[in-house]
Image (cartoon, rainbow, N blue to C red):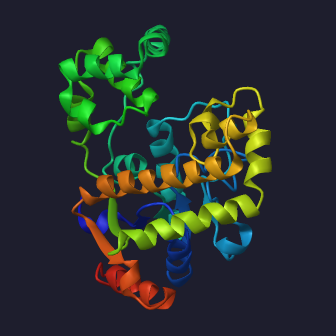
């Protein structure tokens, strides 16, 4: 596919609390665009405060897609995201608008922009249940050791806390004979239909990012996170929320197993760790143009730098 035939797309990526949503809206306003979320938790209904879902005021009239549409009980895969996001991009582009992707779920963004192909014929629900039971009885590390024995690359790439992804990697190998690493390589053979300008937000002084994360958590508590989390965690089938940062750390508090201060500090700590993992992921991508937020005086200067990066694409 020639470059001129590809769909122009902006992607604003980076760690939590770095300002992705705000910059994406600014770029969309300047380029007659619409925002497509790439956040694995903001897709779920009701998880608004804890996932920092943009408010109507923060959207500033810019249409946003793939937010707040999935019930908590609905399983949602990377393949599901790529399918929906691809359709969104096509529709936005067909309207003569510029698609602006914003989010911190690196696997979603890479799979979408690299046009990774997924197959649905290697699923085995019985095997999944068996592996989940093994993890419950023997610990996730037992599955990690099994995965490491035939696919050390995936074992290194996948975080042990991501149980569903560990199970998926084993499932692929057991049902197809190919490792997840091999499948990823084969899936990249289809050319991408997108001409992407990837903009990453980071901080030269990491502590400044951590301070922003801490302040955001305090604001979440002020804005009603406790009420939201208690309501969601008490719903039937709330396993999704049980895995989400900002919710699972409050469970011990609701059970009177720790103080509110301890629970809030746990949210801050896990959010900082998540930001570090996000940066590790995105730093591997040589296509990302980085903006160091703390090197600029204000948001206007950050926006102007982003505009310059987009202008270089010559769309």
Position of the N terminus by quadrant: bottom left
Q: Quadrant of residue 223?
A: bottom right
Q: Give how far across and how far down residue 93 sits, in percent.
A: 49, 65
Q: Can see residue 248?
A: yes
Is residue 99 visible to us here? Answer: no
Q: Nearer the viewer, residue 206 or 10?
A: 206
Above or below, comparing residue 210 to residue 315 in the picture: above
**Camera-side residue of 281 and 135:** 135
Q: Is residue 236 above or below residue 49?
A: above
- Say which residue appears at 58% left-offset and 46% top-offset: 41
Is 253 positioned to the left or the right of 206 in the image?
right
Residue at screen point 66% across, 52% down: 261
Is 11 situated above or below 154? below
Give coordinates of residue 162: x percent, y percent.
43, 33
- Percent from the top left, x then y, of residue 231? 80, 40
Q: Position of residue 141 (x, y in %)?
A: 35, 22
| Residue displayed at 20% across by 33% down | 153
Nearest the viewer among 124 and 225 is 225
As drawn, 29 above or below 154: below
Residue 134, by quadrant, is top left
Q: Quadrant of the C terminus?
A: bottom left
Classify residue 70 by image quadrant: top right
Out of 242 and 315, give the one closest to the viewer. 242
């Amino acid at each position: 596919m020639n470059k001129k035939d590809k769909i122009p797309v902006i992607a604003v990526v980076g760690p939590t609390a770095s300002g992705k949503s705000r910059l994406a809206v600014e770029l969309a306003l300047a380029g007659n665009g619409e925002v497509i979320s790439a956040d694995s938790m903001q897709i779920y209904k009701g998880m608004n405060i804890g996932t920092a879902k943009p408010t109507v005021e923060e959207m500033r009239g810019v249409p946003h897609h793939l937010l707040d549409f999935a019930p908590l009980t609905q399983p949602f895969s990377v393949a599901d995201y790529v399918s929906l996001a691809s359709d969104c991009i096509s529709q936005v582009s067909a309207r003569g608008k510029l698609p602006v992707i914003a989010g911190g779920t690196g696997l979603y963004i890479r799979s979408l922009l690299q046009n990774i192909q997924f197959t649905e014929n290697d699923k085995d629900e019985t095997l999944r249940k068996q592996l989940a039971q093994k993890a419950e009885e023997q610990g996730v590390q037992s599955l990690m050791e099994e995965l490491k024995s035939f696919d050390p690359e995936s074992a290194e790439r996948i975080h042990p806390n991501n149980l569903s992804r560990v199970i998926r990697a084993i499932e692929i190998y057991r049902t197809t004979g190919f490792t997840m690493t091999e499948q990823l390589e084969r899936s990249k053979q289809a050319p991408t239909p997108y001409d992407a300008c990837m903009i990453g937000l980071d901080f030269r002084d990491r502590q400044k990012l951590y301070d922003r994360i801490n302040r955001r958590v305090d604001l979440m508590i002020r804005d009603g996170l406790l009420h939201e989390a208690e309501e969601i965690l008490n719903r039937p089938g709330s396993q999704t929320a049980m895995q989400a940062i900002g919710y699972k750390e409050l469970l011990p508090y609701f059970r009177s197993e720790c103080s509110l201060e301890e629970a809030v500090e746990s949210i801050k700590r896990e959010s900082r760790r998540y930001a570090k993992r996000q940066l590790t992921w995105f730093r591997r991508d040589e296509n990302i143009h980085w903006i160091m937020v703390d090197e600029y005086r204000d948001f206007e200067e950050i926006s102007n730098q982003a505009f310059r990066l987009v202008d270089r694409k010559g769309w």
